[in-house]
Image (spheres, rainbow, N blue to C red):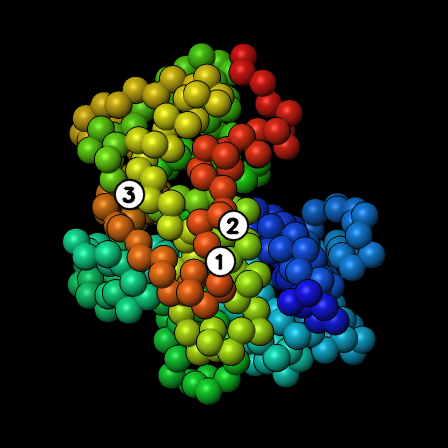
């Protein structure tokens, strides 16, 4: 098997993406240590959970026992300087580091998005965004640090699209349990009709986790960036229809102006940036690079509808 005899560390890996990265690494024969605050129990001798918030002391204790073949941290570092210190420490104890960036670093584009497409940080002059964004901008700065200051080392940048699971069911700006709460309470969810036929920057976390796991220790992935996307090509309308059919939630398509009035844009810069610098972009993503390097094909993935059903089964969800 691909990872037989290989040992991986997932930092803050008990959540949406980490769970599926672990599953794929185990399926491919690897052993996995997961640091996470969640109280999780493993039924696989090759999977070990360390219930804790990550600390230098915990890492040093693990590193004293194991040199890991690959490490990925799922922590979002709002301060790029903090990640730089973490990277130096991890680099001493592994052969491959995967850095979790985001597809949200990309600027708007009428052309299909590839890994070389312009990023917001490269082209945007809007001080309101540049001064308030604490997500895409820090990730971009770390990307540039890896490319410019850690050139030649074995790191990989991954830029996942929005990845949903039972922990967070996403639809445009709805997340976590909002969709199921609306279904239970028979309250409609409003969505902007302008997005109905836009390409959805959305994928099942099982697809995303599989893609990330298969990049580990791949020489063609060293020093490269990858958009993590299975290439399904679904629109937001497709995703909304799947949620309607599977959960019973009612979707009401309204004008963009009416929808925007429901958003706390002035109170929450994060929501404003997410809306104006991501969701209203009709990005078509070219997934050919990551599919080529991982060797995965359409048959290896689930559709958005299938992914939603899998997560509803995890929750034992039944239509109200």
Check whether the beta carbons of the residues at disc 3 and disc 2 lie within 8 A of each other: no
- Dot label at residue 296: 1
Q: Locate residue 257 relative to residue 223 in the image: left or right.
A: left
307 in relation to 206, above or below? above
Task: Mark 1: give few (<14), some (14-19) or many (20+) Cα within 10 Å.
Answer: some
260 in relation to 248, above or below? below
Q: Which residue is mark 2?
A: 300
CA distance separating discs 2 and 1: 6 Å
Check whether the beta carbons of the residues at disc 1 and disc 3 lie within 8 A of each other: no
- Dot label at residue 199: 3
Task: Mark 2: give few (<14), some (14-19) or many (20+) Cα within 10 Å.
Answer: few
Helix, strand or loop at mark 1:
loop
Q: Position of residue 113 (x, y in %)?
A: 27, 58
Q: Position of residue 247 (x, y in %)?
A: 49, 21
Helix, strand or loop at mark 3:
loop
Q: Nearer the viewer, mark 3 or mark 2?
A: 2
Q: Is residue 91 visible?
A: yes
Residue at image point 55% right, 53% down: 209
Q: Nearer the viewer, mark 1 or mark 3?
A: 1
């Amino acid at each position: 098997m691909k990872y037989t005899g290989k040992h991986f560390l997932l930092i803050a890996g008990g959540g949406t993406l980490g769970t599926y990265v672990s599953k794929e690494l185990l399926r491919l024969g690897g052993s996995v240590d997961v640091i996470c605050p969640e109280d999780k129990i493993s039924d696989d001798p090759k999977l070990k959970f360390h219930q804790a918030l990550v600390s230098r002391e915990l890492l040093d204790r693990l590193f004293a026992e194991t040199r890991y073949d690959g490490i990925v941290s799922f922590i979002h570092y709002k301060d790029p300087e903090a990640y730089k210190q973490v990277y130096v420490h991890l680099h001493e104890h592994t052969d491959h580091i995967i850095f979790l960036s985001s597809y949200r670093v990309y600027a708007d584009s009428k052309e299909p998005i590839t890994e070389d497409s312009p990023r917001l940080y490269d082209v945007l002059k809007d001080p309101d965004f540049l001064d308030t964004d604490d997500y895409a901008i820090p990730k971009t700065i770390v990307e540039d640090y890896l490319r410019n200051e850690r050139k030649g080392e074995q790191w990989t940048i991954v830029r996942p699209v929005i990845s949903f699971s039972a922990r967070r069911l996403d639809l445009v700006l709805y997340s976590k349990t909002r969709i199921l709460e609306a279904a239970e309470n028979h309250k409609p969810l409003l969505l902007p009709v302008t997005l109905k036929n836009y390409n959805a920057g959305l994928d099942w976390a099982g697809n995303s986790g599989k893609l990330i796991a298969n990049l580990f220790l791949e020489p063609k992935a060293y020093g490269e960036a990858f958009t993590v996307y299975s290439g399904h090509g679904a629109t937001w309308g497709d995703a909304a229809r799947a949620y309607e059919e599977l959960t019973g939630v009612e979707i009401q398509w309204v004008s963009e102006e009416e929808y925007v009035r429901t958003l706390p844009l002035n109170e929450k810069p994060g929501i404003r940036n997410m809306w104006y610098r991501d969701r209203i972009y009709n990005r078509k993503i070219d997934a050919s690079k990551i599919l080529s390097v991982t060797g995965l094909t359409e048959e290896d993935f689930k559709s958005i509808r299938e992914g939603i059903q899998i997560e509803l089964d995890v929750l034992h969800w039944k239509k109200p």
